[in-house]
Image (spheres, grey):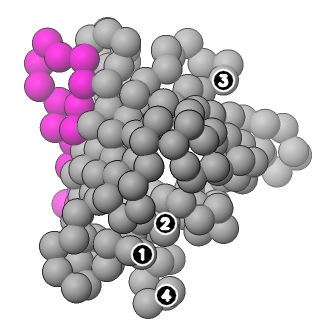
Amino acid sequence: MEKKTKIHAEDDRQDLTITREFDLPVELLFKAYTEPEIVEQWMGTKVLKLENNKYGGWEFETSDPNGNVVFKASGVIHDFVPNEKIVRTFEMENILFAPQLEFLEFEKLSEDTSKLTMQIIYKSIEHRLTQLKLPFAQGLNMAHNRLEEIVKKLK
């Protein structure tokens, strides 16, 4: 099955671009990234904080069935324009990855379709290459599939 989420990573660069078209109005796609109860469903994580404003912060945490924290990430929102863009940092705890900068752009394609474009900038080419060696693309595609499935029910 073809992945709908596309990752474009040019050689010798420390950034990559992710694109995905959704069968969702842009307003619903944006809600999927900004409403904690929706984020928790499609990401499968607990939202500890999500301050959707310029200089707001966010923090997510995932635990195993025994309650042990297995993933924790946080960052700062640097720019926030409803239904258009989010600029934020992304940092994982207890992992050797340096913080990254993410530019999320939300584009209306029609009344019922939209597009997400994410540019992620890493500290170095090596950090980006390490990320790409992980099952990052498959995980992101699966998460976006869940996002679309869950949010379609909100229509």
Q: In which quarter of the image is the N terminus?
A: bottom left
Q: Which of 28 and 72 is in front in this view?
A: 28
Q: How far apart are marks 3 and 4 (CA)?
A: 33 Å
Give the left or right position of residue 124, taking residue 31 as reference: left
Q: Please state which amino acid type lies under the numbered disc 3.
A: Glu
Q: Quarter of the image holding residue 143? A: bottom left
Residue at 32%, 72% (x, y): give it.
26
Q: Nearer the viewer, mark 1 or mark 4?
A: 1
Give the left or right position of residue 103, taking residue 60 as reference: left
Residue 107 in view of the camera: yes
Q: Which of marks 3 and 1 is in front?
A: 1
Q: How crowded is mark 2: few (under 14 residues within 10 Å), some or many (20 or more)?
A: many
Percent x, y for residue 42? 54, 63
Q: How crowded is mark 1: few (under 14 residues within 10 Å), some or many (20 or more)?
A: many
Q: Find disc 1 in the rendering and name its residue.
A: 28
Q: Find disc 2 in the rendering and name its residue.
A: 32
Q: Does the magenta stretch include residue 116?
A: no
Q: Which element carries disc 4, helix, strand or loop?
A: loop
Q: Find disc 3 in the rendering and name its residue.
A: 93
Give the residues drawn in magenta, as a range: 1-17
For marks 2 and 4, the one nearer the N-term is 2
Q: Which element carries disc 1, helix, strand or loop?
A: helix
For marks 3 and 2, the one nearer the N-term is 2
Give the left or right position of residue 70, taking residue 102 as reference: right
Q: Nearer the viewer, mark 2 or mark 4?
A: 2
